[in-house]
Every structure is written in C-alpha cells, then in structure tokens.
Amino acid sequence: MLVRCPGGPLGGTVRRPGRPCEDGRVPDVTPQDPFVPADVPELRDLLPTARVVALPMRVRFRGITVREALVFRGPEGWTEFSPFVEYDDTESAAWLRAAVDFGWTRHEPGADSVPVNATVPAIAAADVADLLRRYPGCTTAKVKVAEPGTTIEDDVARVAAVRRVMGDDADVRIDANGLWSLDQATTALEQLAPFRLQYAEQPVAAVADLAALRTRVAGLGVRIAADESVRKASDPLAVARAGAADVLIVKAQPLGGITAAQAVMAEAGLPCVVSSAIDTSVGLGMGAFLASRAMAPGYAAGLGTAAMFTGDLTAEPLLPVGGRVAVRRVEPDPDLLDQWAASPERTGWWLARLRRVHALLVARP
C-alpha cells in the first residue's frame, strides 16, 4: 500500500505506510486516496482456497531454480501472493495488498494482448539461440548481466549473441539488478553500447549513482531504467524526481497492485515498462492487466516469463504467442495445483507468512 504526502513535486510524494513525509508528518490514509485499494478481507476469506506451489525453472534465474508462490481465489478470480522468500513481512505486505486488489477488484483490460520481451538469463552465449526459440514472435529481449560468478566478457558475448540471433531491428535491454559499482557500470556500458541497447536496467543500486551514471553515459546513447529503485524504495517516485532514470520498471505485486501501480505510473512523468516478478501465470495475469491499461506505447512488457518454467498452474499458461501475451485472468487447474504442490513444510511456512502479513495489513490505519 502507498499513501501520499501533501504538496511537492509530481503532486506530492508517495510513501509506504509508517514512513514520514519530508516535513515529518505521517500522511493520512483515506478511502478516497487513489493509492489505497479496498479494505483487506478477513483471513477466513483467504485461507479456504489458499494453495502453495513450487514451480521448477528451466535455468537458474535470480539465484533460484524453483519459484514458490501462494495463490487463492477472490470474488473476481484467482490471485497471487509471492514475495521472494528473503523478503521480510513489512516488505511482503505490498505483495499481499496487490493480491487482494486483483482478487477483489474488477479491473477492465485496456487491450486483448500486450507485446512482451524474451528474457535471457546469465547463460553461455552458445545457448542463446536455443533459449530464444521459447519466445516466438518476440522482437525485444532482456538480457541478464552482472550475475555473480560471471565476467563482463561473458556479458558482452551474451548480448552479442542476442543481437546476432534477433537481428538489427530488435530491441535489446540489459538488467544488472544493481550489482555493478558506478565505475564498473561505466566500463560495462562503454563495452555494451555498440550493441544499441534500448536501455540498461538498474545498472547500479543507489539513486545518486544512477543519476551520476546517466550523466556519464549520456554520450553513448544508453538510457537508464530503474527497477529496484522503484519497487523497493519508500518513495517509488524519488528516482523520477531526482532525474536519475529515463524509464521506470513497474511490477504490480511489489507496488501493491494494479490500482497503486497505475497511480505511480500516471505521476512518474517517464515512460513505464511493466514487468513480472517471476510470477506464475496467475500473477502474470495481474501484470498483463496493468500493462494493457497504463504502459508506455512502443515498449514490450517483461511478462513473457512463463516460458522460464517447466510447468505452470494451468494447461494454458500465459506464454508468448506472436510476441504477445493475452490479457486475461488465469484459472488454475486443480490437477496442476496438486502436481506442483509445495512440500508440507514449505506450505506451512507460506501459510504462517500469510497470517503474519495479513495481520500487518489489518493493523494499519
């Protein structure tokens, strides 16, 4: 959940609950505030349909080979709560707010489908062509770089392979997840710029370093995109006000759902690209609705990530077709919920987490 501070640039800054504004006041939360979705339903409305799943991934991505998630049904359909396991309860609260927003709110799609990018993990350059075959029709690729245990030479070879396979007309992005230092990022972008990057996503962690890097590489024609500086910040618009990015990456779950994320996108004053948090197809549906309603034209959403799983919760996952994914809610298949059910120990862990995070939301004003 996000709340608004009064006044200031962009119509007032936004904060997560409990974070004071610049003047020290804690912003009021009112039902009319566009950053505040409907009230949280009672826990007894969530638990009866709650299922915990563990989906195996084709290759390691973001340090994991299995993606765990909790899904449950609301009045408007199935929804997903899947903060990464290392996130604490406070950070996870926005993800539960997002699940409630999607499950309890009737969101109208802005289109039947949205264009999506291929996602290329930190794999060997020789494996790029085979991987890209899982993304038929995609003309944009996001390439992971700066992965621990790899080198800039590995990154350059991987990006070069993507450009070679996809051709000169494709859009190629890179994503460093904030793992480079300012100097490392400068050197890396100097070497990667010849591949005509659409943008470099979160090359460094700090907003101040993003701003400095943006100045350093201005002559290279490389635009800077912010991801973690949006979804993990107390004020998701701070990076825009600081002039530290050219593009914002927006993920529905970490920002508290479609309602909250769309409000951030409307106020950002920058192009926004909707991306997934390695969601199941249930969560990808949430992102697809958001992308269809608010994403900048001319960009592909990062919502083709169902191709990264060897299995999903539905026989009709949100996989790219002709470079696009459908904008629709996904109904899990009961047999697949059973097939991919997490172990009893992991199920207990997730249900305990759901109870704790729900208590946090209920306790907030």
Image: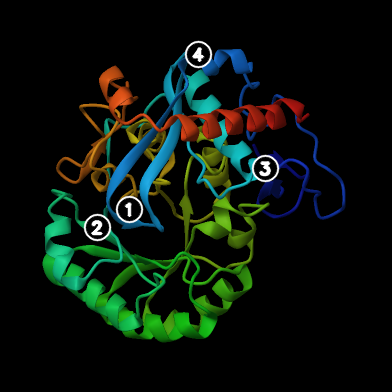
User: Circle 1 sits on which residue?
Assistant: 299
What colour scheme was applied to this rendering of the protein?
rainbow
User: Circle 4 sits on which residue?
Assistant: 48
Of discs 1 and 2, which sits in the foreground?
2
* Dot 2 amino acid type: Thr
Q: Position of residue 273 (x, y in %)?
A: 41, 51
Which comes before the other along the chain, label 2 or label 3? 3
Q: Please report contact status of discs 1 and 4: CB closer than 8 Å, yes or no.
A: no
Comparing 35 with 10, the one in front is 35
User: Circle 2 sits on which residue?
Assistant: 140
Of discs 2 and 3, which sits in the foreground?
3
**Which residue is pictured at 80% across the width and 35% down the height?**
28
Task: Name above or below for residue 213 compared with residue 255.
Answer: below
Judge from the rendering whether residue 168 lies leftward or rightward of residue 48; answer left or right: left
Which comes before the other along the chain, label 1 or label 4? 4
**Which residue is pictured at 80% across the width and 40% down the height?**
27
- How packed mark 3 is, by other alpha carbons closer than 10 Å (few <14, some 14-19, many 20 or more), is some
Q: Secondary structure at mark 2?
A: strand
Quadrant of the rendered structure where residue 92 is? top right
Q: Position of residue 360 (x, y in %)?
A: 71, 32
User: How many marks do you count on the picture?
Assistant: 4
